[in-house]
Amino acid sequence: MNDFLYLYRGGQWSNRTPEQMQTTMQKWMAWMKELGDKGHIKDMGHPLEQQGKVVKAHKSVTDGPFAEAKDLIGGYTLVQARDLAQAAELTAGCPIFENGGFVEVRPIMKTGM
Amino acid sequence: MVAALTRVFGVHNLALAEDVVQDAFCRAMEVWKFRGVPENPSAWLMATAKHRAIDVLRRERTARTFAPELGRLLESEWTLVPAVEELFGTAAVKDDLLRMMFSCCNPRLNDDAQVALVLHILCGFGVSEVAAAFLDTEAATQKRISRAKKILAGSKRLFDLADADFARRLSAVHRALYLLFNEGYHGASSESVMQVELCQEAMRLTGLLLERESTATPATFALAALMSLHAARLPGRINASGRLQTLLDQDRSQWDTALIAEGQRLLERSATGSELSEYHVEAAIAAAHARAARVELTNWAQIVALYDKLAVLRPSPIVALNRAIAIAQYQGPERGLDELHAIADLDRFARYPFYFAALADLELRCGRRDAARQHFGEALTRARNPMEREFFEQRIRACEA
């Protein structure tokens, strides 16, 4: 098994009614739970707020800019899969697709000699 | 509420669950003081407890392990809130109550401790109320409850209703609920209001067992029938002047006919399968009494036969005592006295007044007033509350009249 990082990008997160939020959370839970039951979750990670700060060298701290809203990272999860192909397949059913977002799947680099 | 929170936090964090409930109540008092009691106070409390639970889970995510069977669902913000929402849903809460009930009836705890835990955790009785129910001191009850909680917390997770030990544990649950009901019905506590409440709690929890297929066994139906049939007689046990009435002297028109009908229905439903539990027999005895509109119409032959059966299923001095009383009704007081004298284990009655009261009654019916008077005197010294005391004093006066 190899480790992969799911970066949930884009998708409409705010401006929704509490009921819609709740339905979405339920869907995330169901999806995560299924993935976990199949033994693919290493760390569920967390969703991220849209605001934050960008820190660059020389202590330059700004409130942005981040990537464009459509690419903004909305959360992350650490998963385990046989290979990149399987890791990509496992994103099927992820609720982010319903909100116009997408999942970036990145293998964790194995450093070491 | 404690049950639901314990399911979320894990049994080993029972104390934390209680703190959160306590906290919710304190908040409620503060808020309600200013804004008045909301329309649905229990829902308000539940929601407050839920939010506090989520706070705690977030804050202590790394410091504690919570319910192991929930795995990672509580660790991530992806799933934390929906998972807790689900656990606080009505169906889930009922499930948690059952699981908590089964957890409290841990074989490592004795009967008294099990019943005390059920009262404290599932019925929300405070330590002083539990102490009052058992006629025990607060300090002793406190000690018993905290010792029991420690054992419970050591079991790590709530009892799994799919466990292989389920059947055995279910009979422990039956036993605890039966004792809880009896404590209310025959118990020594002097406050009658409290007694009725104990009976109601036992019936409520038994009702929960009936709602779930795996726990709604014939024995559960029989236990529920038994409780309904006995509870139906509660209004007749105390007469208009607040005096205790024996079954034979009760005004039967005061019996609750709806509860009797419910008890009969439950008893019929219990008659499936091959299992004949002690609760079946006891319920059948209660039903035989309930069927007799007047005491003369009682089918004593049937009742004696049922007591014979019960004495085999659950031999005890109390069963023997009741059997002797039934025999006295069926075959005369002399035969009843023979049976009373033949009971083994008489020292078990050292502190129980009704054995002596039975002796006295039968002596009186044989016309031996002095012997009767003496036995009522012995019962009087063992009376456990003012109502019993007054009852025996009145009987003594009757002997002298």
Image: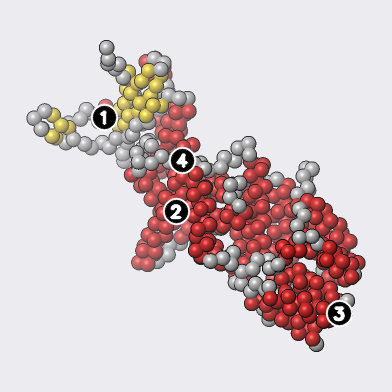
Label 2 and label 1: CA atoms lie apart by 42 Å
Q: Is residue B209 left or right of residue A37?
A: right
x and y, in percent, of residue B213 in the image: 66, 43
Element on which disc 1 rests = loop
Within 10 Å of disc 3 (Cα), the crowding (few <14, some 14-19, many 20+) is some
In which image quadrant can residue A83 be found? top left
Closer to us: B353 or B258: B353
Residue positioned 61% across, 52% down in the render: B110
Whether labels 2 and 1 belong to a single chain: the reply is: no
Q: Position of residue B383 (x, y in %)?
A: 67, 74
Q: Residue at 81% x, 52% y: name it.
A: B312
Residue B9, given in percent of the width and then of the height, sits at 44, 44
Q: Amino acid at mark 1?
A: Leu
* Label whose residue precedes the other's in the sequence (3 or 4): 4
| Left or right of B4 on screen, residue B246 | right
Residue matched to label 1? A72
The answer to whether residue B148 of the structure is visible from this angle is yes
Question: How far apart are the two marked residues, 4 and 2, measured between alpha carbons?
Answer: 15 Å
- Rendered residue at 73%/47% (across/down): B218
Quadrant holding the C terminus of chain A: top left
Distance from disc 1 to disc 4, alpha carbons, whole Å, reads 34 Å
The residue lying toward the viewer, choosing from B211 and B56, is B56
- Say which of marks 2 and 3 sits in front: 3
Q: Identify residue for label 2.
A: B18
Element on which disc 2 rests: helix
Q: Chain of mark 1?
A: A
Amino acid type at image mark 4: Ala
Question: SS for tag 4?
Answer: loop
The numbered mark at residue B368 is: 3
Amino acid identity at mark 3: Arg
